[in-house]
Image (cartoon, rainbow, N blue to C red):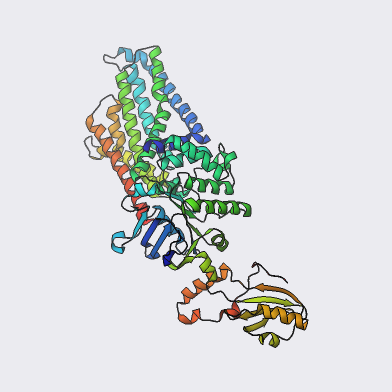
């Protein structure tokens, strides 16, 4: 059932979390300004931003650890599954699972004891907690670790236990603050696939400064900068944001660049090395085919033709830099000449 | 919920090897006191026998022993209470409790009753040792019961102070020193006031314990302990609420 609302083009299902006008300051320093968020069932939302952008503070407010500043005056509110978190915290919090930046582990307890405590703390009955424990342990890859003392386990395992305590009571909303920090690449991949899987049945909101994380797990991206939400879209749209059309070609026997520039649709050519060129073209005309035919006819010996694709890093830097400048000219600087191509983009080789 | 949190507190305490060491060491000290006092009583017995209204064995042994334990607890309780909230804050496990569907009173009371149960176990050796005297003589169990009740109320008031100070900081050491300063301060207010009817006496928990110690059950003393404990527990709850409000 595709939902056609423009604000959430990709998502379906009911809204599990909605936050309005969250504002928070510590002393005189305001760290979060009027942030509003919405999350639907079956959606993974990535909260992206530099260090100190206010991501963790926002998540703490969503998890109920921190109250927003003068909620009445600012009209702030957080609804979890339709329950007002600020008015009925105990009811609403039963639907939240929260993993803070540092997993909140009692290091002297065994994994089983700790997870059972976490489940019971969220109001699960002992029988249900035992069942949930077995399932969660299996889900988070903790089968063999049940009787081990948490303090003796490695950082990766502790992070998994942290995620396990956040999901053991099957909450509707899962709030994860930098869930893959400090893990090795294999563990990162496992945790990401777990988050992806969780995102199918629950709503997940995670903060990160790893863009690859957003690329691989998030349906939607919100970017925070200096406590403000400056960008919000699906992660696919974000990737296309400000992307350029063009490709990199390698010719073993290249002609002078002027000849390439003369091809129909080519807007600019930049020589990268003796045999490599960056060719930019207008979005509506793709001269790729013509180029291949010409290369064959003139004996340029085409070795490689790779479409340019902006990486999320570049898009992110662009969005945040544009916001920093906040002036119109910053957005219209010629992107083609400064934008490096992605090495990881799938290459078409001829 | 309170029971769940209290049990978690106990489980964590008993999972630490240091707890067992402390239990053993304190039992050793209590036993030492007990034997010393008993020896003194046995040495004094011929002289006591000549007195017209001599104190019985319970009054002569149990009363000084309990009053020593009460003094010792003043130094000990801050070492146990320092961990309660300060360490949770430092290890950032407090977020688990704050994000759970709990009210502040659940958190505070759970920790309070958890530690109270632990300290009840810790001091249980004292009346048990005294009961061994029943093998050779008859004991005044009324006096024993009054002392036990007094000690429990006194411990509760100490824990409440320690819990509140622990809620103020993220450093367990500061929590320990702070609670010790408050408790010693209250004790000094009691012993430094020369006049018998000085109001300073009334502030001190140890002063109110003295009646229980001599076997006198006074509802005024009992209500002092209840009010004192309740006040600091409420302050701790308020501090947790401020924790959410001000970060």
Residue A8 position by quadrant: bottom left
Foreground residue among A170 and A31: A170
Q: Residue at x 30, y 39 (%)?
A: B229
Query: Is residue B61 in view?
Result: yes
Against A318, residue B80 (above or below) is above
Q: Which of B173/A125 is in front?
A: A125
Image quarter hosting the N terminus of chain B: top left
Displayed quadrant of residue A339: bottom right
Task: Give x and y (percent) for residue A225.
Answer: 46, 68
Q: Nearer the viewer, residue B104 or A77?
A: A77
Q: Residue at x 34, y 17 (%)?
A: B57
**Is B147 on the left-hand or right-hand side of A247?**
left
| Quadrant where the C terminus of chain B is found in the figure | bottom left
The percent position of residue B196, horizontal first and vertical second, equals 23, 34
Task: Please say whether residue B40 is visible from this viewpoint.
Answer: no
Q: Is residue B24 above or below residue A296?
A: above
How many callouts does the rendering have? 0
Seen from the viewer's position, the closer of residues B57 and A324 is A324
Q: Is residue A312 above or below residue A333?
A: above
> Which residue corresponds to the image point at 45% horizontal and 42% vertical from the top-left?
A118
Whole-percent x, y for residue B45 in the image: 36, 14
Decide if residue A15 is on the left or right side of residue A189.
left
- What residue sits 35% from the left and 34% below the top? B155
């Amino acid at each position: 059932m595709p939902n056609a609302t423009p604000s959430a083009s990709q998502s379906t299902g009911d809204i599990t979390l909605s936050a309005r006008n969250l504002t928070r300051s510590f002393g005189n320093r305001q760290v979060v300004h009027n942030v509003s968020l919405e999350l639907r069932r079956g959606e993974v939302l990535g909260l992206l931003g530099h260090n100190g952008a206010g991501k963790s503070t926002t998540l703490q407010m969503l998890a109920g650890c921190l109250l927003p500043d003068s909620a009445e005056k600012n009209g702030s509110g957080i609804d979890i599954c339709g329950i007002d978190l600020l008015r009925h915290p105990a009811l609403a919090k039963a639907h939240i699972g929260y993993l803070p930046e540092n997993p909140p582990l009692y290091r002297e307890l065994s994994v089983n004891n700790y997870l059972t405590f976490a489940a019971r703390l969220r109001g699960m009955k002992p029988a249900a907690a035992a069942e949930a424990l077995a399932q969660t342990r299996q889900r988070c890859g903790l089968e063999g670790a049940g009787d081990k003392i948490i303090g003796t386990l490695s950082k990766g395992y502790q992070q998994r236990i942290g995620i396990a305590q956040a999901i053991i009571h099957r909450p509707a909303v899962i709030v994860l603050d930098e869930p893959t920090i400090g893990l090795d690449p294999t563990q990162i991949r496992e945790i990401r696939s777990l988050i992806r899987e969780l995102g199918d049945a629950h709503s997940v909101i995670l903060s990160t400064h790893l863009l690859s994380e957003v690329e691989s797990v998030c349906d939607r991206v919100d970017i925070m900068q200096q406590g403000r939400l400056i960008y919000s879209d699906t992660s696919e749209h974000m990737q296309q944001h400000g992307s350029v059309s063009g490709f990199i070609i390698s010719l073993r026997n290249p002609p002078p660049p002027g000849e390439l520039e003369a091809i129909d649709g080519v807007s600019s050519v930049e020589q990268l090395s003796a045999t490599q060129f960056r060719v930019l073209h207008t979005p509506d005309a793709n001269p790729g085919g013509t180029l291949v035919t010409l290369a064959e006819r003139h004996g340029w010996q085409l070795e490689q033709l790779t479409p340019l694709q902006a990486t999320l890093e570049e898009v992110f830097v662009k969005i945040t830099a544009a916001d920093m400048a906040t002036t119109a000219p910053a957005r219209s600087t010629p992107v083609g000449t400064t934008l490096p191509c992605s090495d990881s983009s799938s290459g078409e080789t001829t | 919920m309170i029971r769940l949190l209290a049990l978690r507190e106990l489980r964590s305490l008993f999972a630490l090897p240091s707890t067992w060491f402390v239990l053993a060491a304190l039992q050793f000290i209590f036993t030492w006191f007990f034997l010393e006092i008993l020896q003194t009583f046995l040495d004094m017995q011929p002289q006591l026998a000549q007195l017209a209204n001599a104190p019985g064995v319970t009054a002569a042994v149990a009363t000084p022993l309990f009053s020593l334990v009460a003094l010792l607890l003043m130094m000990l309780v801050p070492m146990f209470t320092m961990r309660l909230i300060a360490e949770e804050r430092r290890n950032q496990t407090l977020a688990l409790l704050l994000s759970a569907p709990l009210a502040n009173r659940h958190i505070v009371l759970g920790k309070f009753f958890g530690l109270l149960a632990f300290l009840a176990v810790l001091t249980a050796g004292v009346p048990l040792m005294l009961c061994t005297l029943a093998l050779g003589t008859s004991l005044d169990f009324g006096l024993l019961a009054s002392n036990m009740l007094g000690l429990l109320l006194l411990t509760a008031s100490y824990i409440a102070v320690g819990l509140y100070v622990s809620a103020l900081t993220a450093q367990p050491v500061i929590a320990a020193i702070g609670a010790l300063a408050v408790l010693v301060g209250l004790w000094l207010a009691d012993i430094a006031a020369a006049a018998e009817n000085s109001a300073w006496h009334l502030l001190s928990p140890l002063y109110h314990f003295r009646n229980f110690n001599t076997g006198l059950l006074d509802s005024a003393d009992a209500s002092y302990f209840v009010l004192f404990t309740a006040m600091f527990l409420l302050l701790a709850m308020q501090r947790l609420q401020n924790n959410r409000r001000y970060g």
